[in-house]
Amino acid sequence: MSYQIFQLTDHDRSAALWIHSTSMLARQLTIVAIIAFMSLSCASSQADEQVAEATSLGEHGYANSGDTKIHYVTSGKGPLLVMIHGFPDYWYTWRNQIPELAKTFQCVAFDQRGYNLSDQPVGIENYAMPKLVNDVKALIEHFGRKQAVVMGHDWGGAVAWSFAMKYPKMVDRLVILNLPHMNGLRRELANNPEQHKASAYARRFQTAGAASQLTANGLAFWVKNPAARKKYVKAFERSSFEGMLNYYKANYPKPPYTTKDERQSTSTPKVQCPVLMIHGLGDTALLPGALNDTWQWLDNDLTLVTIPKADHFVQHAAANKVTHRVSTWLNVSTTEK
């Protein structure tokens, strides 16, 4: 075997260097292209998953509330039923109720601003109750309706209460899950040491920098079904943690607690429509004492259902009972009109 030794000229070295550099650049561009493709594939996969998730329970779309785009899923025909989730949650919280209720109503479950596929405006002022209430109004008008049944859980319940007080003619009936009337909550915060203690989490959420301590996995702690928990984690990854906590900073009572809402210059108007309240008595954040005297702030019928051992997320903890109670109450109250 023979060997030949070649001596490179300066021109050869330059050519070799150029070839090496070009090869390196090509490899880098290839890597960038692969990463971009993977990112697009991931985004496309997430979008496909959202569509599949939505179409199994209804069709998804968007409504405009001023400059804020609100994502919703709708199913069924009939009178409009607007379904409002709380914290930490998204439209999918109503998955156990939609199939049954959609038999007699057009259900519209939406992502509140800051969550999942809805817009996530910056600033505490963009999460003040008037903004949240106007999102519900925009949705009802988006579907060309003048009135709806409004159903809310947790912060969705607070929005539902407030909407019924501000726009009484737009609310046919009101369904509230595990959220006392805010007057009852203020009273308990001011006078009940147990509720004061139970609301420590809300005071933490009202502090600067609290959002930095949240994670998508941590927020999904309460979701017991593993498959559902994966969906929640992905939805929370798309959400604004700062936006979530702005609900507390803009609207939750702040210490020192009093029975009066300092943000209101006039007394709280009474709710004019029939109200169904369902409360899981295992709720450790919102204690049942705040339910007392709710009738003082209503000018119509009140039906109160308590479910022992069911926790704060009563629409999951007692899904069949909640669905049956809501469906029965809505159908009975319709025939009594």
Image (spheres, grey):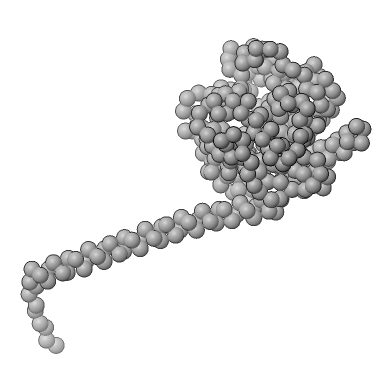
Is residue 184 or residue 171 the one in the foreground?
A: 171
Residue beneath the point at 77% across and 48% down = 76
Q: Is residue 159 above or below residue 219?
A: above
Q: Is residue 23 above or below residue 155?
A: below
Is residue 334 or residue 308 the one in the foreground?
A: 334
In which image quadrant can residue 109 be found?
top right
Query: Along the horizontal axis of the image, is 67 left or right of 151?
Result: left
Residue beneath the point at 63% across and 44% down = 62
Q: Position of residue 18 (x, y in %)?
A: 19, 66
In which image quadrant can residue 7 be found?
bottom left
Q: Is residue 61 visible?
A: yes
Considering every residue shown, the one lying at the far bottom of the view is: 1
Query: Along the horizontal axis of the image, is 54 left or right of 297?
Result: left
Is residue 334 or residue 30 the one in the foreground?
A: 334
| Quarter of the image where the N terminus is located | bottom left
Residue beneath the point at 84% across and 23% down = 300
Q: Is residue 329 above or below residue 18?
A: above
Q: Is residue 320 above or below residue 132?
A: below
Query: Along the horizontal axis of the image, is 276 left or right of 251?
Result: right
Q: Position of residue 240 (x, y in %)?
A: 52, 37
Q: Position of residue 281 (x, y in %)?
A: 75, 29
Residue beneath the point at 77% across and 34% down = 147
